[in-house]
Amino acid sequence: MRKRAKPSRIGRFHFDPLLIVLSTSLLLIGYVMVASSSLHLGVKMTGNCLYYPIRQSIHIGLGLFLGACVALTPIRAWEKLGQWLFIGGLLLLVIVLVPGLGIKVNGSTRWLSLGGLRIQVSEVVKYFAVIYMAGYVTRHQQSIRESAFGLIKPLILFSVASLLLLMEPDFGSAVVILIIAMGIMFLAGARLSQFIMLLSFVALLAVLLVYFEPYRMKRVTSFMNPWADPKDTGYQLVHALISFGRGEWSGVGLGSGIQKLFYLPEAHTDFLFSVIGEELGLLGVLTVIVLFSLLIWRTFEIGVAAEKAGERFSAFIAYGLGIWFGFQAFVNMGVNMGILPTKGLTLPLMSYGGGSMMIMCCAVALLFRVHTEVAEINASSPRGSVGMRIRNG
C-alpha cells in the first residue's frame, strides 16, 4: 500500500474545548495562588508587592506566544528534528554546569539567564525527551517489541542526560525523563518481562543514589518522620502538613493563609499546592486534582485518536506528554502531602517560574497541534478509510 503523505498545511485550526477549559483553569488558579503566596515576598525582596505576580504574567504571556508558535509548527517538523533537539538539550545541560554560565540557587546549578529570564534547563530537556522518544519508538517499534537491545539503546542518551542532571544536582528531573522514556517504550509494546527487569534496575540504581548521598538520605528519613526534627530536616514537610490541617474543608480564605508568610519555604513554587490546601481547603485541593486528572485523561484520549488515525508519532507525543504531566503533578502533590520525599519539581501550569511555565505552555500547544492534525485527517478521510489504514499498518 502506498505511503500516505502527512498534511503539511492545516485547513483550519481545530480547537479542543475541553483541553482549553482545563489548561486555562489550571493557569488561572495557579496565577491567583502564586499572587496570593508571593505578595509579602515581593515586599521583602524588592519593596514591590506585585513583583512576582507581574513577572508571572510575563512568563504566561511569553508561554502563550511560544505556544502559538509551537501550535503552528507541523508535527512532521518535530519528527525530523527530534534527535537534534535532544542532543541540543544535552549541550544545554553541559553549558549550565560551566562555571560563570549556570546560575546557582539553593545549592543547585539548574538555570541559565536569557534576557533577564531564568530558564531551568531540565524543563527544556523534558520537552525534547518526549519528542525524541516518540520518534525513536515510531522508527524502531519492531525492535522494541522483540529485542532487549531495542530498549537499552535509547537509554544510553537518557543515562547521559540523567548523569548531567545529577551533577546539578537535580535528582527529580532525572527520574522524570527516565519515566517518560520507559513509559513511552512500554506503550510502544515492550515485552513485559524485559520492561520489569529494566524498571527494577532503574529502581535499584535510584535506591543506591539515595543511599550513598547524605542529603538525599536525609530527605527520605525526614519524610518518613518529619516531626522527629521539625526545625531542620523535617521543616518543609511539617509546615506543609500544617497548611493542609489549617485548611480543613473550605480553607481559611484566599489571601488569609499564614504558613506562606516566611514559614513555608518556596510557597510560590514547589509548595504552592500546600498554600492551595490552606487557603482553599479540601474543596480547592480536590478541584486541582480533578482538573489534572481530566487533563491527563484528555491527553491520552488524543493519543488514542492519533493512533487510530495511523499517526503513530503523534500518538506517542500525546502519550509522552500525558506521562510527563501526570507523573510530575503526582510527585509535586505527593511531596506537599507527605506521601513522597521532598523533590524540587514544580506543579505543571501553576507554580511560579519562567522556564517551567513557558515549556509547559509549549507542551500543551504541541498537544493542540496533535489534536488539530488528527482532526484534519479524520475530516478529510472518506468514512472507513482510517480503519483500513490501521489494518494495513
Image (cartoon, rainbow, N blue to C red):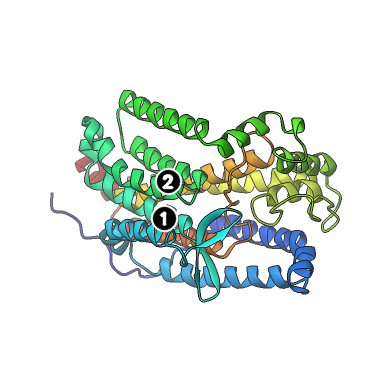
Which amino acid, by three-letter code, is at mark 2? Ile
How far across and down, in percent of the image, does residue 205 sit?
42, 31
Residue drawn 73% across and 58% down? 33
Kind of residue at disc 1: Val
Label 2–label 1 contact, CB within 8 A: yes
**Which numbered circle lies on residue 58?**
none
**Looking at this view, is 332 or 221 the one in front?**
221
Does 161 sit left or right of 173 as displayed? left
Q: Would you name the residue on which mark 2 appears? A: 177
Query: Residue sitting at 42 percent across and 67 percent down?
Result: 70
- Classify mark 2: residues with Cα within 10 Å, few (<14), some (14-19) or many (20+): many
> Measured from the top left, where is residue 277 in percent x and y?
76, 46
Q: Is residue 272 left or right of residue 100?
A: right
Q: In the rendered view, does 31 fall on the left or right side of 4?
A: right
Measured as percent of width and height from the top left, residue 280 is found at: 79, 49
Q: Nearer the viewer, residue 128 or 232?
A: 232
Residue 69 lies in quadrant? bottom left
Q: CA distance from mark 2 to mark 1?
A: 8 Å
Label annotation for residue 125: 1
Task: Tell me: residue 42, above or below residue 254.
Answer: below
